[in-house]
Image: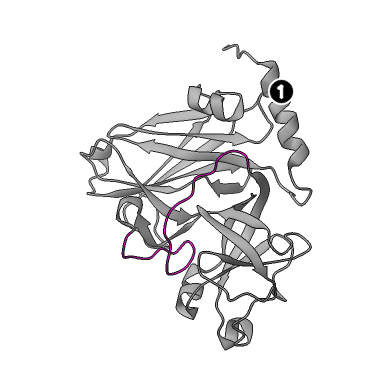
Amino acid sequence: MKKRLRHLFATCIAAAALSVVSPIVSMAATRGELSSVTSDTISGWAWEVGQYDSSLTVEIRIYEDMDRDSVPVKTMTAQANQFSQAVSDSIGDGWHAFSVPVDWTQLGGSEYFVQVYSVMGQTRHQLGSTFSYKPGQETSSRIITGPGDMIGLELEESKAGSSSNSGGSSQESYVELTGSETYLGAFLVTGYCNCELCSGGHNITFSGTVPKANHTLSADLTVLPLGSKVWIDGVIYTVEDKGSSVNGQKVDIFYDTHEEALEHGTITADVYLL
């Protein structure tokens, strides 16, 4: 049995992290990401926050297209219990990485889209971004996306001049987590605009600002007060609005058009407080 060395600072980090987690968290907080997809390996890391002595199961899904109702052409599971120095530097314990072999020639396609999920009982959470990979390439491309949402995605290296479904019609860049944020939990995330159906035709937020795509967020102000800045799917939003149906662990992202708000649909996403 592999013996894992534990350091005193790791315990201190765990205690500090647990002490700042918001009391609204009602489920286990998980962190992690899909780190790379190569010609023969899919790798990343997954961690249940504060749980240094246990490992998470991850589910890796490989798709051939970007449709919302796509069925994976291959699904693999792995235990996130391998060592990574980068993960150790980030959370104080490196034994939460995973790396699984993949043979793309068996799948027969020309391009694939890869997602990784943490698995806790019947609950699955997408960790980090979706990656695209074309067999024959040395490395993969990160896609700007939210958990479970595979419509209107945009490759990171060709963002200019096009739009993303993650936060409105003028998405500029994907912001990485730094590790200093406070994880608030998995929220229901919907989209809205300033049309009659969404907000009664009002073009001013509850805080008195003009709402902007990739910026304005509507939230339950008892959970996230006005002015709160949160990270959702690589975009930093500011709470400027509230809604009668936005209660508890639910937020509403502002979009420029009603079509974009409808396209967003209802997803579950990890929310971090800056």
Relative to 135, residue 149 above or below: below
Relative to 193, residue 168 above or below: above
Q: Find residue 208 and report its horizontal and vertical position in percent.
A: 67, 76
Secondary structure, mark 1, is helix
Residue ID at (55%, 35%): 46
Q: Find residue 65 and report its horizontal and vertical position in percent.
A: 32, 57
Relative to 114, residue 146 above or below: below
Q: Is residue 84 visible?
A: no
User: How would you classify the magenta stretch by its main secondary structure?
Assistant: loop
Residue ID at (57%, 12%): 2
Task: Write down the residue under mark 1.
Answer: 11
The count of marks equals: 1
165 within the magenta span: yes
17 within the magenta span: no
Residue range in magenta is 160-180
Q: Residue furthest front?
A: 209
Relative side of 46 to 134, left or right: right
Check the image and tell me how it is coloured: one colour
Q: Find residue 5 and report its horizontal and vertical position in percent.
A: 62, 13
Q: Give whichever of 7, 121 is nearer the camera.
A: 7
Relative side of 24 to 117, left or right: right
- Residue 152's quadrant in the figure? bottom left
Q: Is residue 213 visible?
A: yes
Residue ID at (49%, 22%): 85
